Amino acid sequence: MSGVAGGIHMPDLGRIASWRDENMGWIVVTARAAFGVWLMAITVLAVVPHADDGLMVQTNVTASGMEKHILGYFVGAWLLVLAQRRKGAKGGVGDPGMLEYCNAGTRKMMGVWMSGGGVFGYSVVLEGVQAFLPYRTFNPYDIIGNGVGVGVFCLIFLAQSRGGAKREVRHWS
């Protein structure tokens, strides 16, 4: 319910601030919480100093630790796509919004690429912040690894989605 306070129209903040509504299942709620945790963790890991012999270096599989960037941003893109799903949407991504007039397949594809672009854009911002931190360094290869992780997720997700649609069509014909 909205109200008027001192002549100013006030929106229903309870409804706006609600992070769980009747259209979301427990998977979406969990994915939203997990994405929030991922976002905080990736931000902290990007800006805190690391010891040269610390846990982050000791757990590297490759010399550069590229696998952490690829896996970390693959997971971030996956969580964001899951967080936008709606109960009963059969794998769709979020509300149509500006893509309202597109068909469902195009909406899903655009939603996945926009989510991936958002996660990748955030990785570029974090890498840019590292350029200004005296104890961190800007590394363009980190950005490439982040992009690979996001891109691989998007391609796998869309290929899996498209394969499911083809199987469904073959089943009915």
Image: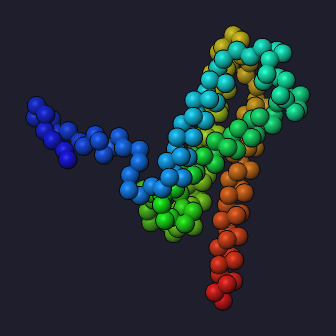
Task: Note whether 16 is above or below 125 in the view shown.
Answer: below
- Left or right: residue 173 versus residue 87 is right
> At 57% across and 40% down in the image, what residue appears?
34
Task: Note whether 41 is above or below 153 in the view shown.
Answer: above
> Residue 29's x, y, as percent?
49, 48
> At 64% across and 30% down in the image, what residue appears?
42
Residue that protrudes farthest toward the bottom in the picture: 173
Q: Nearer the viewer, residue 132 or 65?
A: 65
Can residue 66 be seen in the rendering of this structure? Answer: yes
Q: Nearer the viewer, residue 119 or 53?
A: 53
Please tell me in which quadrant of the rendered image residue 76 appears: top right
Residue that protrudes farthest toward the left in the picture: 7
Task: Note whether 25 is above or below 119 in the view shown.
Answer: below
The total of numbered circles placed on residues is: 0
> At 19% across and 44% down in the image, what residue appears?
2
Please tell me in which quadrant of the rendered image residue 97 appears: bottom left
- Left or right: residue 87 versus residue 171 is left
> At 53% across and 46% down in the image, what residue appears?
30
Q: Nearer the viewer, residue 103 or 71?
A: 71
- Please state, as top left, top right, bottom left or bottom right, where the C terminus lies in the image: bottom right
Q: Nearer the viewer, residue 154 or 59?
A: 59
Task: Note whether 31 is above or below 128 in the view shown.
Answer: below
- Left or right: residue 159 versus residue 87 is right
Residue that protrudes farthest toward the top in the picture: 134
Can residue 99 be seen in the rendering of this structure? Answer: no
> Residue 47's x, y, as percent?
64, 20
> Residue 37's x, y, as percent?
57, 34
- Left or right: residue 28 versus residue 148 is left
